[in-house]
């Protein structure tokens, strides 16, 4: 199965490495096809890894991982092409944190809304699953702790009915 990853940061690289380790073909996408972090990751991962733009990764993946900064979701998904993600599982790993005023960050979403709901509205025909956003990237793939692996929370939505 082909996996597309939207984002080249710690989360994208950690999950990309996990998918490659499991034998999956992974394409990591960013705003620019020749992103330095993505190219370094591709070289480290070998023949199962490739890089491109957000649109390239979205087209490539049967499953697509959204691993951008939460405040960049809308821009990244528009560049990926919502129509390209129609009918696909989109794993949203993001948290809507706004670092513009420094640390600690504030939530960029409040009230009766959530980041995952916003992603689902941007991708009305995709299967959005929220996962991996409650643990740090070093613990997303085969974590080892004295008392066993951490609990991993996830929830999903379904595309709207037409």
Image (cartoon, helix red, strand yellow):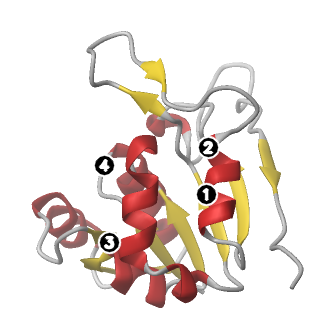
Mark 3 nearby-residue class (10 Å; few <14, some 14–19, many ≥20): many
How far is disc 4 from disc 2 in space, using C-alphas? 19 Å
Say whether disc 1 or disc 4 marks the residue closer to the N-terminus: 4
The answer to which image quadrant residue 105 occupies is top left
Q: Which mark is residue 22?
A: none
User: Mark 3, mark 2: which one is toward the viewer?
Assistant: 2
Task: Report which residue position mark 3 lands on.
Answer: 29
Which quadrant of the figure contains the N terminus? Answer: bottom right
Which residue occupies the foreground of this view, 157 or 18?
A: 157
Q: Is residue 10 left or right of residue 144?
A: left
Task: Report which residue position mark 2 lands on.
Answer: 115
Say whether disc 4 or disc 2 marks the residue closer to the N-terminus: 4
Measured from the top left, where is residue 149 in percent x and y?
Answer: 71, 33
The secondary structure type at the circle numbered 1 is helix
- As drawn, the residue found furthest toward the top would be 104
The reply to whether the C-beta atoms of the residues labelled 4 and 2 are less than 8 Å apart is no
Q: Is residue 162 left or right of residue 92?
A: right
Task: Report which residue position mark 1 lands on.
Answer: 119
Residue under the image location 48 percent in, 67 percent down? 21
User: Mark 1, mark 4: which one is toward the viewer?
Assistant: 1
Mark 2 nearby-residue class (10 Å; few <14, some 14–19, many ≥20): many
Measured from the top left, where is residue 97 in percent x and y?
Answer: 45, 29
């Amino acid at each position: 199965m082909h996996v597309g990853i939207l984002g080249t940061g710690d989360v994208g690289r950690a999950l990309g490495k996990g998918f490659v380790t499991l034998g999956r073909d992974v394409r990591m996408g960013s705003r620019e096809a020749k992103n330095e972090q993505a190219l370094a990751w591709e070289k480290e991962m070998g023949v199962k890894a490739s890089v491109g733009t957000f649109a390239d990764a979205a087209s490539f993946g049967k499953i697509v991982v959204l691993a951008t900064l939460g405040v960049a979701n809308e821009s990244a998904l528009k560049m990926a092409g919502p129509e390209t993600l129609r009918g696909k599982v989109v794993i949203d790993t993001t948290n809507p944190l706004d670092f513009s005023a420094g640390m600690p960050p504030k939530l960029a979403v409040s009230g009766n809304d959530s980041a995952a709901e916003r992603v689902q509205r941007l991708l009305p025909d995709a299967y959005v699953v929220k996962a991996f956003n409650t643990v740090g990237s070093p613990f997303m793939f085969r974590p080892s702790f004295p008392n066993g692996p951490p609990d991993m929370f996830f929830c999903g939505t379904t595309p709207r009915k037409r």
